[in-house]
Image: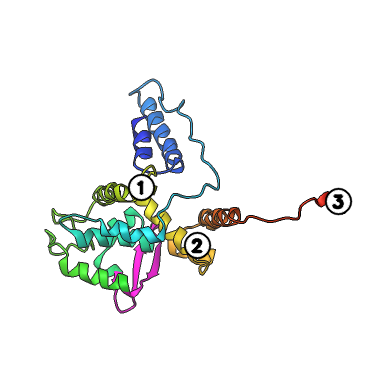
C-alpha cells in the first residue's frame, strides 16, 4: 500500500510500518461496516520482519560537524540549530516542531522537551548549544501572529512543519553523502540523527543506560538497550584486529 511504502521511503524502520498497519486495517473495517466498501485490502498485507538487536544506523561523532557545516539555506542559523538539537540532544522531528520559546531556559541551562505520550523531559545544555540557541533567537523570523510561541518559525511566519524539518535534514544529507562517501549507500533520515546522538553518547562509556533512557524519553528501558549492541559491535571489531602468535607444534607437548 502506498502509505506503508512512503513510511519506509521516509527513512522510518519496519517497526514504524508495523505500528501503522493495524490502524489502516481498522479504517477499512469501519468502511466495510458503513457499507462503503466490501473487502478490506489491508487484511492480506503482511507485517514486516523486524530484525531484533539490529545495530542502529548512525553518523559517527567525528562526521556530525561535517554535516552541520554543509547546511546551505537562506535560514542557515535556524536550520543548523534544528539539526544540532537532533544530533546533540536527540530530539525527534515532532519535538522540534512542538518546541516553544518558553521551553528554553537559559538561566537553568536546559531545554524542556514535550515527547511522546505528552511526557516532559529536561535536557541540560552544553555551553556551545546555549550560544547557538541564543544566536538563533536573534535571527528568529517574525511570526505572522505576535502571540506565536513557536521556537522555530517557517518562512511563512508560522510554526515550522514536520515536513519542513525533514526537508532540512534530507537536503543536508544529500550534500553530506557527496563529500563523505562512506555514507553514500547508507539510508539517512532525520531520525538517524537521534540514533547518532544516543549511539555516540553511549559509546563514550561515561553514560549508563538509565541516564540515556531519560535523555531520550523512552518509556521502557528495553527500547534504549538497542544502543548497547553498538558497543558489542565495536568490541568485536576491536578483537578482530588482534593477531595472536601461538606456539608451533602444540601436539608435541601432549
Horizontal side, residue 155 vs residue 200: left or right: left
Q: Which residues are magenta?
A: 104-127
| In magenta stretch: residue 181 | no
- Label 2 and label 1: CA atoms lie apart by 23 Å
Image x and y of residue 93, in percent: 32, 53
Label 2 vs 3, first from the N-terminus: 2
Secondary structure under the numbered disc 3 in the rendered image: helix
Tell me the crowding category of disc 2: few under 14, some 14 to 19, or many 20 or more residues within 10 angstroms, Cα based. Answer: some
Image x and y of residue 34, in percent: 35, 27
Residue 33 vs 148, above or below: the answer is: above
Asked if disc 2 and disc 1 are in contact, CB closer than 8 Å, the reply is no
Query: Which residue sits at x=43%, y=43%?
Result: 13
Label 1 vs 3, first from the N-terminus: 1
Question: Where on the picture, by quarter, is residue 153?
Answer: bottom left
Q: Residue furthest bottom?
A: 107
Q: In the image, which is nearer the foreground, mark 2 or mark 3?
A: 3
Q: In the image, which is nearer the foreground, mark 1 or mark 3?
A: 3
Closer to the camera in the image, 144 or 213: 213
Identify the residue position indicated by label 1 in the image.
Answer: 181
Identify the residue position indicated by label 2 in the image.
Answer: 203
Horizontal side, residue 47 vs residue 123: left or right: right
Residue 30 appears in the rendering: yes
Tell me the crowding category of disc 3: few under 14, some 14 to 19, or many 20 or more residues within 10 angstroms, Cα based. Answer: few
Amino acid at each position: 500500500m502506498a502509505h506503508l511504502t512512503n513510511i519506509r521511503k521516509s527513512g522510518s524502520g519496519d517497526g514504524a510500518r508495523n505500528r501503522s498497519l493495524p490502524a489502516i486495517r481498522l479504517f477499512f473495517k469501519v468502511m466495510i461496516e458503513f457499507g462503503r466498501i466490501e473487502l478490506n485490502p489491508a487484511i492480506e498485507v503482511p507485517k514486516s520482519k523486524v530484525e531484533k538487536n539490529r545495530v542502529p544506523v548512525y553518523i559517527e561523532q567525528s562526521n556530525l560537524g561535517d554535516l552541520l557545516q554543509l547546511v546551505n539555506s537562506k535560514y542557515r542559523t535556524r536550520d543548523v540549530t534544528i539539526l544540532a538539537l537532533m544530533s546533540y540532544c536527540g530530539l525527534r522531528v515532532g519535538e522540534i516542531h512542538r518546541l516553544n520559546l518558553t521551553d528554553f531556559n537559559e538561566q537553568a541551562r536546559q531545554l524542556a522537551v514535550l515527547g511522546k505520550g505528552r511526557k516532559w523531559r529536561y535536557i541540560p545544555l552544553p555551553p556551545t548549544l546555549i550560544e547557538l540557541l541564543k544566536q538563533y533567537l536573534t535571527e528568529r523570523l517574525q511570526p505572522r501572529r505576535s502571540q506565536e510561541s513557536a521556537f522555530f518559525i517557517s518562512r511563512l511566519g508560522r510554526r515550522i512543519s514536520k515536513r519542513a524539518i525533514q526537508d532540512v535534514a534530507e537536503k543536508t544529507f544529500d550534500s553530506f553523502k557527496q563529500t563523505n562517501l562512506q555514507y553514500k549507500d547508507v539510508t539517512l533520515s532525520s531520525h538517524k540523527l537521534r540514533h547518532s546522538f544516543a549511539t555516540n553518547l553511549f559509546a563514550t562509556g561515561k553514560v549508563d543506560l538509565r541516564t540515556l533512557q531519560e535523555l531520550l524519553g523512552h518509556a521502557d528501558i528495553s527500547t534504549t538497550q538497542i544502543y548497547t549492541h553498538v558497543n558489542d559491535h565495536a568490541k568485536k571489531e576491536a578483537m578482530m584486529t588482534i593477531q595472536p602468535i601461538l606456539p608451533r607444534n602444540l601436539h608435541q607437548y601432549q
